[in-house]
Structure formats: C-alpha cells, structure tokens
Image (spheres, rainbow, N blue to C red):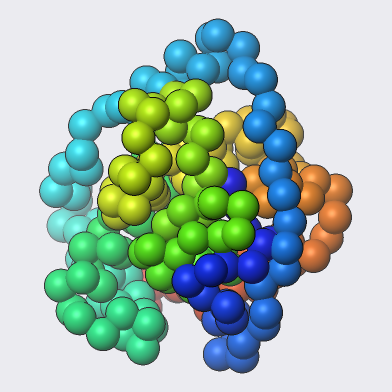
Amino acid sequence: MIGRRALVALPLLPWAGGAFRPAIAGTQAEEPLADSIRSALAAAIAQEAPPKPVFDRIEDRLAYLRWLGAMSERLKRRKAEHHTRVEFLQSVWYESRRAGLDVSLVLGLIQVESGFRKYAISVAGARGYMQVMPFWTRLIGDGEPARLFHLQTNLRFGCVILRHYLDRERGDLFLALGRYNGSRGKAEYPNLVFGARKAWDWKDPGS
C-alpha cells in the first residue's frame, strides 16, 4: 500500500480545510504472513458484495440517511455525479463498519492517499482509492491487480489491511497508519490522516 508517494494520476492531494499539499514519496515492504493470517485475510476479502443496509430501528435508518446526505454534500466538489457519489459513500460506510473501522477515518485516509481518485496510481504501483499495493492480490486475492480499480474491491482490501495492521499494533492507530503507509513510527503520515479525518467527522443533528 501506500500513500506517502507521489501519485502519477494525482500530483497534488486535497487535504483538510480545502488546501492542497504535494504527495510525498514513501515505500512499504512486502512482509511475510503466517498461514493462519493469510487464510483469515483471504477469507475477509472474499466474502460477498455489500448488501443493502438493514436496520432494526427506524431511528438508525434515518440517522444513516442523514449521514449519507451530509457526506454527499461534502463530497460534491470531488465527485460531481450524484449516483457515483452515493454508491461510493455507501460502499465506504459498509466496508468500514465491516472491518470495525471508523468511517470518517477511512474517508480521511482516502483523501490523503488518492484525493478520491478511483484510478490513482503511485510511482510504486499502489492503486485506487486506498492505494493498495498489487502484491496483496497475490498474497490474499486472485492475483489480478486490475481488480484494485474496482470500487468495492479496493475499499475491501484497504479496510481489511488497515484492520490487520491495527490488530497487529494492538489498537495503536498511530502505528497502524504508519505501517499502512510504510513509515511506521514517523508522525507525518498519521497526522495527515488525522487532519483529513476532521473534514468527515459528523454528529447526527437528529440524535
């Protein structure tokens, strides 16, 4: 994966507050995985496509729809087409929650990594919204890197891998983000994501 590397498709990345910052080069080493971890990750990315959200309470459904409307408005200048915008947000919501991640965190990471560009490619070859390195498709997928340009596939890989790093770092988000970026222990990348995350925080006015 990932992201503190100049993007071929995106020389400048939008960041919290609407300013622009240049992408910064970085690397991430492919690490060996224990067979049990490899199997668990492969199972996690192989499960079926996201279903339509089902809520036990009407209040939860209304809260979800309010979130979707608010995030759609915030994302409008980056994704002008309404259907594409809503599909993207629905997928981010589902894949984030499925992996046990905060949705605003994932949106902040996507902003830093790709600036919401579906076909962004880094100089190291990382692909798509969450800048997933192709070697992951060989380790836990079907070996086809082109699939990383598919919306849900990219988000699923990215969220599952970030969850893996978060578990590996025993819940330390700062270190997990550094590992995702290939800069573990350095503050710059986590701080960029934490800053971008603020643009996607949301408090339900109906709660």
Residue 97 in view here: no
Q: Position of residue 24 (x, y in %)?
A: 72, 68
Name the residue nearer the viewer: 64 or 123: 123
Image position of 151 with respect to 8: above or below: above
- Residue 83 location, quadrant: bottom left
Q: Position of residue 138 (x, y in %)?
A: 46, 27
Name the residue nearer the viewer: 52 or 204: 52
Name the residue nearer the viewer: 202 or 9: 9
* Residue that appears at 20% across and 39% down: 49
Residue 124 in view here: yes
Quadrant of the image containing the C terminus: bottom left
Label total for image: 0
Image position of 134 with respect to 71: above or below: above
Name the residue nearer the viewer: 182 or 171: 182
Image position of 163 with respect to 154: above or below: above
* Residue that appears at 31% across and 79% down: 79
* Residue that appears at 54% across and 9% down: 36
* Residue that appears at 73% across and 56% down: 26
On the rendered structure, is 156 left or right of 24? Answer: left
On the rendered structure, is 159 left or right of 80? Answer: right
Q: Position of residue 21 (x, y in %)?
A: 67, 82
Q: Position of residue 22 (x, y in %)?
A: 67, 79
